[in-house]
Amino acid sequence: MSNSATIEKMKEMKFFGMQKAFELSMETNTTRDFTTDEFLAYLIEAEYNDRQTRKMNRLIRSARFRYAAEVEQVHYPVSRGLDKNQLLRLATGNYIQRKESIIITGPTGVGKSYIASALGHQACTDGYKVLYYNASKLFSLLKMSKADGSYLKYINRIEKQDLLILDDFGLHPLDEQNKLALLEIIEDRHGKRSTIITSQIPVKKWHELLDNQTIADAILDRIVHTAHRIELKGESMRKKMINK
């Protein structure tokens, strides 16, 4: 079989990484540097790496992060109160394996969303399914989905994610319907999947924010008391950038 026919069959079978590696080896005439076993291993490794890269890119696109953030780009000034060791430990993804959650709080502009997005991006790199939502937009979406009958579809999709990021929780009051939706989401994920919540509101005020003792107790018991906590301080980083 000719090389061109081999390449066409690789394309047909969607072995794109193997195809590129095979074509490159033909162009550079490097096949003679390999034994048969080594060349086969080279092609398989190229295909594996290509599939992993495409999977990671799909996961990142599907997550719809607010920022194209990476843990390596996070800054740790003392005034920010961010523990570098803690963040790097979380970046290993062990909290996802253990089905644990993270709460990130602090004033506006200190980088809560960026850190959450960076951890989510790292999770995608490690092959986990992640979904990012602005909390207010999610609750509006769920309320509309109740009307058109698609509520269960969204809830089921959220439940299946290895990591759910709820950003800017507490910026807008929740009505009873949205409180129940939040409880359902937390209940579905408790002990089964991981969740990251960011908020300008200190955790000690969440009970007051939810304004329903039964629902508040249920939510706080399932997520707050066992979550990793990152409490950021300092001035708005966005404001600093504008003033430069």
Image (tube, grey):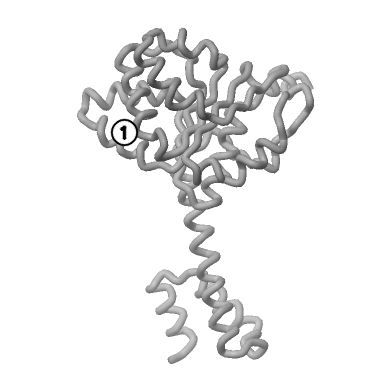
Vertical order, 212 against 236 (above or below): above
Viewer can see residue 29: no
Q: Quadrant of the N terminus?
A: bottom left
Total marks shown come to 1
Q: Quadrant of the C terminus?
A: top right
| Mark 1 residue element | helix
Q: Nearer the viewer, residue 159 or 21?
A: 159
Vertical order, 115 against 147 (above or below): below
Tag 1: amino acid: Ile
Q: Residue 165: give x, y in percent of width and height.
A: 48, 33
In this rendering, position of residue 140 left or right of residue 98: left
- Which residue is at a point 72% across and 21% down the rendered structure image? 242
Q: Residue 212: give x, y in percent of width and height.
A: 37, 9
In this rendering, position of residue 198 left or right of residue 150: right
Q: Nearer the viewer, residue 33 or 28?
A: 33
Vertical order, 110 against 76 (above or below): above
Q: Residue 175: give x, y in percent of width and height.
A: 34, 12
Viewer can see residue 223: yes
Residue annotated with mark 1: 155
Q: Residue 146: give x, y in percent of width and height.
A: 24, 24
Among the 4 quarters of the image, the one containing residue 200? top right
Among the 4 quarters of the image, the one containing residue 32? bottom right
The crowd level at tag 1 (other Cα within 10 Å; few <14, some 14-19, many 20+) is some
- Which residue is at a point 40% across and 79% down the rendered structure image? 9
- Which residue is at a point 47% across and 33% down the rendered structure image? 195
